[in-house]
């Protein structure tokens, strides 16, 4: 078992859920197509990912629960394989939003 420390959050990425205002960028990312840099200048920097919270450190500011859905930058965090499943260890500041049910 991995114990998350300080203000870090362990997230299991939802690989099929990209969020971007441009549907063409989303399609390209989902299909794994290569794009010439001048086609979508800076597009990959704008893309955010959705993931499911697995664990969090004791210094986090917000109250997370296992299963919370969060949005984070595509290139944020450090990748880890845990029992063969991809996880990302993020600083809490790298999280952009947390989905909440009304």
Image (cartoon, grey):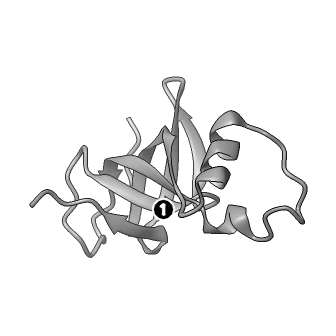
Residue name at image x 78 percent, y 64 percent: 40
Q: Is residue 68 above or below residue 96?
A: above
Q: Between residues 86 and 18, which one lies in front from this camera angle? A: 18
In which quadrant of the rendered image does the N terminus lie?
Answer: top left
- Give 86 or 69, whichever is nearer the viewer: 69
Specify whether 93 is left or right of 29.
Answer: left
Tally of numbered discs: 1
| Location of residue 11 with respect to 96 vertically, above or below | above
Horizontal side, residue 65 vs residue 15: left or right: left
Q: Nearer the viewer, residue 19 or 58?
A: 19
Residue 65 image point, x, y percent: 20, 52
The residue under the point 84% across, 50% down is 35
The answer to which image quadrant residue 52 occupies is top left
Quarter of the figure with the C terminus: bottom left
- x then y, percent, for residue 18: 52, 50
Residue of label 1: 72
Residue 66 x, y percent position in the rendering = 23, 46
What residue appears at the point 26 percent right and 59 percent down from the top-left corner? 99
Which SS class for mark 1? strand
- Which residue reaches farthest top? 84
Q: Crowdedness of circle 1 by 10 Å Cα count: few (<14), some, many (20+)?
A: many
Single out the residue that lies furthest toward the left.
102
73 horizontally vs 102: left or right: right
Residue 75 position within the rendered picture, expressed as x and y whole percent measured from the top left: 64, 59
């Amino acid at each position: 078992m991995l114990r998350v420390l300080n203000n870090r959050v362990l997230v299991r990425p939802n690989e099929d859920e990209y969020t971007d205002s441009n549907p063409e960028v989303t399609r390209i990312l989902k299909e794994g197509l290569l794009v010439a840099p001048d086609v979508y200048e800076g597009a990959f920097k704008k893309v955010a990912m959705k993931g499911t919270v697995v664990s969090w450190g004791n210094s986090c500011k917000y109250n997370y629960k296992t299963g919370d859905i969060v949005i984070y930058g595509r290139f944020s965090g450090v990748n880890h394989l845990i029992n063969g499943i991809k996880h990302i260890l993020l600083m809490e500041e790298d999280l952009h939003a947390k989905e909440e049910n009304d």
